[in-house]
Amino acid sequence: NTLLTDLRSTLDSQSLDVHYQPIYGLRNDSVVGFEALARWQHPVRGAVSPDEFIPLAEETGLINELGRQILKKATAQCHAWNLQFETALSVSVNVSAHQFANSDLLKMIVTTLAETGLSPALLKLEITESVLLSGYEGVADVLANARSLGIAICLDDFGTGYSSLSYLLNFPFDIVKIDKSFVTGLDSEYARAEMVRSITDLGRSLDMQIVAEGVETVHELARLREFNCDMVQGFLLSKPLDAQSVHMLLRDNE
Ligand code: G
Ligand code: G
Ligand code: MN
Ligand code: NA
């Protein structure tokens, strides 16, 4: 498998890239943080989608090293922006279920934060239901220990799985990210709007913040405001940006 060979050497040279999608708080209409997204610019194939290389990394165990490198780059970058622009922006990093098979996951996260200097309070981990379904030993402990250090835990892709609601009962998430599939068309379909309204109400009563993902129209945004959704992310506000573009965005916001 040549793609695998190439992924391995990209990790060896630590040349995987990270893009950052701004997340906006609706309270102040300002950037509150970023979601870090792995990007791979292949010298021959061009951009390879994470939908292709993340599963490959998961199948081959490379996800541990890939996850560590993305976490390190993203937290170092976020810390540098906070120092330069005197901000307290957070960074959200996706963690695969497979990474929980590694009993050193929490240690790796703590070590990486110590290396980069970012406060644990500014790191958010995005996990999907598959983490809670994985059956790996100690998942609940890793999440609880991360939380006790001040790291926020986000339930990603909420609503797309089999039993999303039961997970809200079984683990105290800090943040719930409503999947794009519920947000798209929110403004034009009564049932969809009521669903999102109910999720945001539920989040508020359970003391969880709500992020709406995949916001693409001003009409969707207007409804999300009306529902008192906490944060939004989507192409309407910004696509994922390379580090240089984020730098310009923060400079212009000063
Ligand atoms: O950025 P994009 O929409 O192309 O991402 C596609 C998928 O890849 C998303 O589900 C996203 O969560 C996942 N992904 C992107 N970067 C990372 C990463 O660093 N680690 C993990 N585990 N998944 C990632
Ligand atoms: O699964 P996860 O939520 O981590 O996936 C994030 C992915 O969603 C990123 O790859 C990002 O590029 C993509 N994304 C972010 N905002 C939008 C949007 O408004 N529309 C669409 N179609 N994709 C989006
Ligand atoms: Mn995500
Ligand atoms: Na998602």
Image (tube, helix red, strand yellow):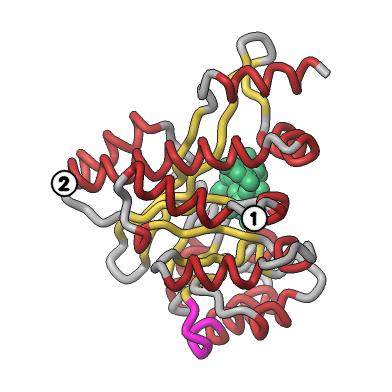
Compare marks 2 and 1 and give the one earlier in the sequence: 1
Query: For the point 57% across and 68% down, which residue is it?
Result: 143
Residue 54 position by quadrant = top right
In front of the other: 72 or 229? 72
**Amino acid carrying mark 2 in the image:** Glu
Q: Start and end of the magenta stretch? A: 203-208
Q: Secondary structure at mark 2?
A: loop
Res. 31 visible in picture: no
Judge from the rendering whether residue 20 lies leftward or rightward of residue 244; answer left or right: right
Amino acid at dot 1: Ser
Q: Which residue is mark 1?
A: 103
User: Residue 30 bears which disc, if any?
Assistant: none
Residue 51, placed above or below residue 133: above
Residue 220 image offset from top left, x and y in percent? 53, 64
Tell me which corner region of the image, top left, top right, bottom left or bottom right, holds residue 213.
bottom right
Residue 50, compared with residue 156, is above or below; it is above
